Structure formats: C-alpha cells, structure tokens
Amino acid sequence: VPNIPGFSLSPGFGISTGEAPWEKPFAVADSVLQSYVGTYDFDAPNNSSMLVTTRNGQLYAQFSGQEEVRMFPKTETRFYAEGRVMRWIEFTRDANGEVSGLSANSSGFELNGIVDDRKE
C-alpha cells in the first residue's frame, strides 16, 4: 500500500506489510495461468465481462470499459491487483477440474462470472 501522508490503515486490515502478493511472490505454473485465460460474463445488474490474459508468465484482468490490470497471486486461485487489497479475483473449477468461473471483488462488491469464451 502506498505511503500517503495523513492516511493509515488500522492494524489487522487486509494484508500485513511485506505479505502482499506484489511484495511476496507466490509461484503459479504457466499451465495453471493458461487455464484461466478467457472471457468471463457477469449477470445483471452489471451485465459486463472480464477478459483474462497472460503475458510473460503474468496474469492480467480487464473489466469491459476499464484498463487492464496486472494481477499478483496470493494462492494458486486468488490474485490481487497491485496496491489494492480490496480488488481480487478467485477462480473456481467444476467437478472435472475445468475452470468454470471466477469471483471478482472490487472495493467490497463481489461479482460472480462464468466462463464464456476460452482462448487456447
């Protein structure tokens, strides 16, 4: 979290200093990252989508109409936007182990998306 004069987070908020995904790398295999690539659709009232891509071993997410954001892994399934503790995505798998969707949290609002299109 950036150091902003006059602003501080209360102890225990979110992720401890030095423990944030962008500060403490967590390795995720390229094959796992590739399994997340695709477009995820969200239902009403949002009716938007998120495009998930990878480049150079890094995961990126982009809500329709917004800029692309690099995501940092905290676990093999949960990724955070740098400097934004309340912005994360977590991938879900079906009974066959295939990626079926994701949950996206943006400042406390959680949306659930399903896989619409998969890029191979």
Image: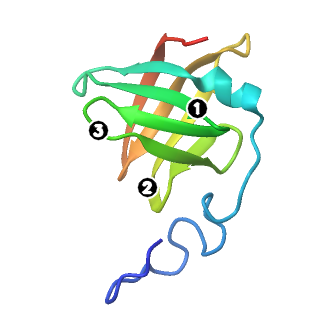
Q: Nearer the viewer, mark 3 or mark 2?
A: 3
x, y percent for residue 119: 55, 13
Label 3 amino acid? Answer: Gln
Task: Report the residue marked by disc 2.
Answer: 86
Q: Nearer the viewer, residue 50 or 77?
A: 50
Taking the spot 74% from the left edge, 40% from the top edge, the residue there is 28
Q: Up-down: is 4 above or below 58?
A: below
Spot occupied by residue 5 in the image (x, y as percentages of width and height)? 34, 88
Indicate the secondary structure of the residue bearing disc 3.
loop
State the SS at label 1.
Answer: strand
Amino acid residing under circle 1: Thr
Residue visible at 71% across and 13% down? Answer: 95
Residue pointed to by mark 1? 54
Is 117 on the left-hand or right-hand side of 68? Answer: right
Q: CA distance from mark 3 to mark 2?
A: 17 Å
Q: For mark 3, what is the residue?
A: 66
Between circles 2 and 1, the one closer to the viewer is 1
Left or right: 101 with respect to 28?
A: left
Pointers 3 and 2 in contact (C-beta within 8 Å): no
Position in image of residue 23 (x %, y %):
64, 65
Comes first in the chain, label 3 or label 2: 3
Q: CA distance from mark 1 to mark 3?
A: 17 Å
* Residue 50, picture quadrant: top left
- Residue at the (66%, 21%) spot, across then down: 35
Say whether disc 2 or disc 1 marks the residue closer to the N-terminus.
1
- Residue type marked 2: Met
Q: Which mark is residue 31?
A: none
Residue 4 vs 88, above or below: the answer is below
Q: Residue furthest bottom?
A: 6
